[in-house]
Image (spheres, helix red, strand yellow):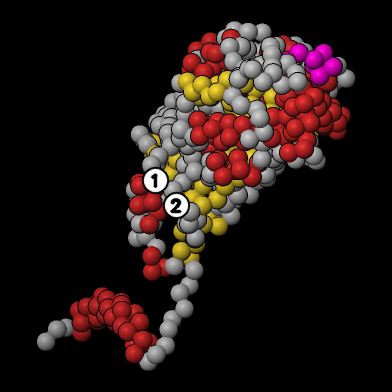
Amino acid sequence: MMPAPMFGRVAAVLAPLVTFLVTFLVAQQLPMLTRALGQSVPPTQVVRRELRIGAPGVPSALDPGAALEGTSPLIARQVFDTLVVWREGSTEVEPALATRWNVSRDGLVWSFSLREGVKFHDGSPLTALEVAASFERQLRPETQGANKTWPALLRGAPGVVRAVRALNARTVEIVLVQPYAPLLTVLAHPGLAIAKPSQAADAPGRLIGTGPYRVVDASVGRLALEAMPGYWAGIPKSERLVFLDVSADDQAESELDSRSLDIWFPAGPPRRAEGALSTPGLRIGYLAFQTEKEPFSRRTLRQAVAAALDPAILGQTLERAAVPLQSFLPPGVWGRREGSPILGGSRTTVKALIKESKWPKETKPTLLVPAETAPLNLPKLAETIQLLLGSDDLPFNIQAEPEATARSLMQAGAFDMALAEATVAGGDPHLLLYPLSASEAATKGPRALNFSFYRNQRLDDVLIRASQLSFRSERQRLYQRGQAMLAEELPWLPIYVRLQWAVARSDVRGLRLHPTGIHRLDTVSLEIPPSVAPAPGATR
């Protein structure tokens, strides 16, 4: 017989084990018992705190200034903060790291007051010295090769910036060599985010930020981020974001179906319609007329082309890659002029404009088009334009060339009409309207951006003035005026705007697409039933 003290100790050990086994067996049998009784147990919704995101070209190291568009700035948006941030659905700006700002009367000095209590991911405080050092880092010779954003948005390196300096711990000044009002809009781009090299022993030199997430794991094709507790703008909805390199429809669909992927940001329109979201982006397609030579030096003929193009028919050819554009700026870009549509008109209007232009019947101009067929079939679009104009007695030939060849011909002015694309880089109207329309960019050669080679001093004055004034309402008024002048002269004709796409599982909550393609993800979460929730600690 076992002694009483020893028996008590054995019972104390076995009692919890027996309780666990009984609870486990009852839990296993409960669903069968309830089904047998014709009852059901409503599944409780739980939130998985890890969001798995597929995108093409996930970087193994994150530098916010390394790319102007694509996956890198999308991820950088989650890790690094900017002085100002774009509003939801628009390129209007609102406070972020800077709570307020002002500009000197001559437009050369911008002062930003920093938010109190912001910390970098290593716990160190954000100060004006750190902001100045972050901008200066992008101007060093050893980093300029990898920095794509600064020169694109600030007219070179150093471009329009003379100096960045800290006045005190909470105030930073950006001093310009000339007035440059687009500065405020482009400062919202993640490429101009505030970053500093890490001092951690396990990651020396890696850049850290003040954003809602920090990088915790990086490898080829995979980047894992972890939510920062105490983030100044609020606790992120998901504890982790895992970015995975996914480019093809087959892979994306398979991983979405197996729940290995929650969101996919494809480079073009996805094959799957279920769960697909889209919004107009910042890349537009337009028809450039060679205004320096006949026949498109005639304004009324350019107007006839615009009137002959039916946006509904163009939309069918664009399919899911783009939508027709009825303004000189895409939706979501501040300063866009709404109102009278640019494309389309009655047959009577077209015939009257052709007659007024004295269209030379013996000539048959050429439309130059890049030979790109995916994600948007540009030669097919050119054929649709050819049919629409041909039905109104405006015949022309199509010349499809490789993209590099087509661009060289455009820069040389060796065309009659050309189908080209441009992006509102950084979200400011100046960065599209000025290069496509101003005389400064109308010089033939590799630096040409105004492929219409259109020159109008009145329009130049409006666009230059709009780029110098810091008052947003006055800039808005000038851009409205400039677009009205473009609508009258039509040196180039907006045709379409490409779409930004995402595919999300039905369990995803809070996903909102931004026209820049740089979406905010700290507001996104995933709700799934417990029956399909992954095992604790499961990773990919």
Q: Quadrant of residue 139?
A: top right
Residue carrying label 2: 272
Q: Nearer the viewer, residue 538 or 449?
A: 449
Query: The residue under label 1 is which amino acid type?
Result: Asp
Bounds of the magenta span? 454-460
291 inside magenta stretch: no
Quarter of the image that includes the N terminus? bottom left
Q: Nearer the viewer, residue 310 or 141?
A: 310
Q: Quadrant of residue 157?
A: top right
Q: Nearer the viewer, residue 23 or 61?
A: 61
Helix, strand or loop under label 1: helix
Helix, strand or loop under label 2: loop
Residue carrying label 1: 249
Q: Is residue 99 above or below residue 174?
A: below
Q: Is residue 511 above or below residue 496?
A: below
Query: The residue under label 2 is which amino acid type?
Result: Arg
List the single residue furthest toward the bottom.
Answer: 37
* x 27%, y 78%: residue: 21
Q: Is residue 71 above or below residue 520?
A: above
* x 49%, y 50%: residue: 503
